[in-house]
Amino acid sequence: MAPPTSQDALLREDPTSRRIKKYTDEKSTMSSDDSDYELEGADVPLTKGGATRMKTREVRPKSKKAGYNVNVDVGGGRKKKGTITVAAIMAGILAALTVVGLVAGKFGFGPFAYWNLKGLPYGYGYRTEWWGPSPLGGTVPAWEESYAKAHKLVSQLTLAQKVNITTGTGWSQGMCVGNTGPVIDQKTGKEIFPSLCLQDGPLGLRFADHATAWPAGLTAGATWNKALIRQRGQLHAKEARLKGINAILGPSMGPLGKFPAGGRNWEGFGSDPVLQGIAAAETIKGIQSEHVIATAKHYIANEQERFRQTNEWQIPFSSSSNIEDRTMHELYLWPFADSVKAGVGSIMCSYQQTNNTYSCGNAKLINGLLKDELGFQGFVMSDWLAQREGVNAILAGLDMTMPGDGLLWQDADSLMGPVLSRGVLNASIPVERINDMATRIVATYYQFNQDNKELFDGEGPNFSSWVNDKEGYLHFGAGEGPKGVVNKFIDVQGKGKDAHGIVARKIAAEGTVLLKNEGDILPLQRGQWKGKKVGIYGEDAGPGKGANYCVDRGCNQGTLASGWGSGAVEFPYLITPLEALERSFNKSKDDLPKFTSVLDNYELTKTESSASEQDLCFAFINSDAGEGYLADGDVKGDRNDLFAQKDGDNLVLAVANSCSRTIVVVHAVGPIVMEKWADHPNVKAIIHAHLPGQESGNALVDVLFGDVNPSGKLPYTIGKTLEDYGPGAQLLYEANAIPPQQNFSDAGLYLDYRYFDKEDITPRYPFGYGLSYTKFELDQRSLKIDIVGKLTELPAPRPSKPLVEPPSFPTEIPSVSEVAWPKDFKKLHRYIYPYVNEDDIVIGESPYPYPEGYDTPSTLSQAGGAEGGNPSLWDTLIKVSVELHNKGPRDGQEVVQLYLSFPEGVKDVAGNDIEFPVRVLRAFEKVEVKNGDSKTVELELKRRDVSYWCVIRQNWVIPRGVFKVRVGNSSRDPGVEGTFKAE
Ligand code: BGC
């Protein structure tokens, strides 16, 4: 489409500035007496979502407004009971603004200087680089049919109906954490397009009953087992579908793990773009095979919790992740490219700013990289309140706002909804944009056959995120209106041999990494401990106060099986290590050892004296983290260090100093520093069991007793200190500016093992490392490296036109009547509608400040052209094969990893030196080989794998020279080596 001319721009409004005005107005006028609500003071029930945001307090209307008509037109007749944080939030904002004023003064900025930040030395961003117009969806054959159906449906809709599809109805106004507005035929009352239910998250179904608590993403990553990762996604989605969920808010692939202490790394799969990308793509394929939409999140560079969100950290702006172009492509964008290639239906943009523009309003990120270069066909939704601007964000490519509210939780003052309606009518937003937004969402729904009543019964979600009772308000957030059945308590966990717990146990066992096994103390032999004494130490072995004791698992107590935050779920049950151990030592009834346990980490004297009497001891320690809206003591989302928490180091020492056979078991959200005890002569074995989910204890004993031969590999490096990961891996704990600035150039491409290799630092355990009970060997003589494609410098040119023509719609501005409030309309409290009062449609009030360059269409990327980017980036160019022998005593699985070293002395077209990491993971396969047997393992390198991103050519380039291929079982294993040459 042709972008509007600057002449047109004179007739447009800027809703963003209205928001800010409103925000300050509210601040000055708000008092509890002015409010319709009074704070009741009681915390809402802990088990469901009502209490999870900023310690929400329950409110109720002072006087019951009688005679509400529920508006079936928009609300679908659903409503429940509400929560609000008005006073707390307002007080927080006042305090925050004061702090900002003071701090900003110190830094020489005016309080709102942010809005004018221009010209920062980074390549992306609305204010520094505009990319537009927003590319249309529907340009690839795989989506053609869905777009044709969507075109047909969207063509019949009014503006209000289209807006409803793009806008959440407000926090807790529907059953799920995100709910779009339904489209109802005004005349017949029939539903034309349903309200979509979006639900967290990457580890299971948040706030749902009778559903599986899966091992975390990090545990799945540690399996390095593609088929198992896919199965996890598939069964997770099956559960979602049976609960009436349209989209799962996962998998997570950002954070990528820049900061080992980052609070949400555990939701993703590991600190390497290739591992992360492959695991994400497998998960997406698994989820979408069940007709549920997967959401790749958080786009992009959301690497730490602190300062990620406005207001949450007493600063009204979120931090900025400043990334240069090559690092963006080779690290952070990489797994998203894999996700798009896998056909992902939706992508969630992140809270923080990227290059000083909010990620959800960053045209270079969304229009440019995602929709043009990667050819993304689905829709982009905001993280919850991550949309911080109205028109800007919409022009930048945001398709859906979640949960629908505006700048504050439950303010019902959406930055889409009526703003979008108004923006289209006054021509700030091109008609083509709203059509594309709605079409992308509807096409995604069709892409996964969600209109098929055999897959989705059309009744919507059958559980409530907010209450546990069977019946209640249908719109919880409204606090008024009709009631009905909100929880049907449908058990979706599978039964008998199809119970999902069986697969969860398998993943947890395969995601358990054996780090040390001196004298082959493991596997333990059943029956051989008869009459012996076994001591089990540490809170992490036991049940604590119950698996669901804290909201969203926001505290570290009892055995650790999940991190905390929106990525956590209610455990249907949790098998503790203690109970599993106590029933696993015997072969027959009477050959159990005598067990002793001390589950209090701080009872060190008792532990020490008890351990001295044992033949075998287990020391359980852990380290927890999670999303930044919850804190456990001084762990405010991100970890403060990498040490075991709750005095874990001293616990291990107390046990190991007294017990000559000590096995240490770690449950943690990532690496922990083990230097105080890893070399202790009595520490015979170390196991990192990650976050195993509900089957924790069972999976652990499977490995301890050798029912499962361990095959997990570290999805990150375990360093000897946090400092060993490098200066670029240190989280920003104190604001260094307003907004806080994080310059990713401090690490560049040197993430995790790449930094250790560069600086030649010996880790405690390297990336990719993990022991087995058998012995594998790769045969150097068998290594074959075949060039099977042309190693030309550049990929084939981008196809000259879209593979498929996207749908087109009339571009006339619709009539105001399309968004007029229906007659006799009674609004639900805090529910977001698309309608506007005619008086509110102000044309020509102020010129809309389009960004520089808005009138000139941006140049399409040569790296683009199809879903996942230029199709030739996905061509296999090199095939590698090698024989793997199992020379040990048992059958087992090994992860064969391919690391690539790029040629030396590479220069770009301008003669600049191009540096490369020593080696980078590029492919892996997990293979099962019987004892005494061998197998040929085949690995492939695609064009993207052997290219670097050239910032000058703005394309992927294969450098000339000799590449080294190393195949081994960790990033430090010399394994077998060969070369190939690009001439
Ligand atoms: C998180 C997202 C999550 C959303 C909905 C946000 O706070 O960052 O990952 O999907 O909430 O719960």
Image: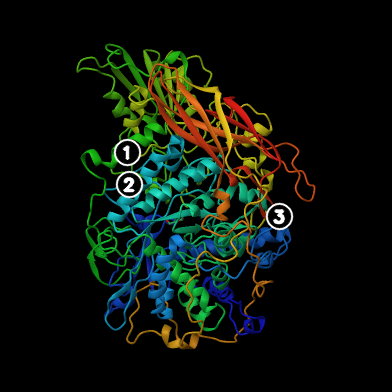
Q: Marks 3 and 2: which is nearer the front?
A: 3
Q: Amino acid at mark 3?
A: Arg
Query: Position of 587 compared to 735: left or right?
Result: left
Q: Position of residue 242 (x, y in %)?
A: 27, 54
Residue 790 vertical placement versus 580 (above, below): below
- Disc 3 from disc 1: Cα separation: 46 Å
Location of residue 497 in the rendering, given as x and y in whole percent from the top left corner: 23, 38
Left or right of 871 on screen, residue 959: right
Q: Which mark is residue 953?
A: 3
**How many callouts does the rendering have?**
3
Which residue is labeled 1 in the image? 503
Which residue is at a point 31% across and 78% down the rendered structure image?
73
Mark 2 to mark 1 CA distance (whole Å): 9 Å
* Mark-to-mark CA distance, 3 and 2: 43 Å
User: Tag 3, which secondary structure?
Assistant: loop
Q: Eyeballing the image, is 190 above or below 119?
A: below
Q: Quadrant of ligand 1?
A: bottom left
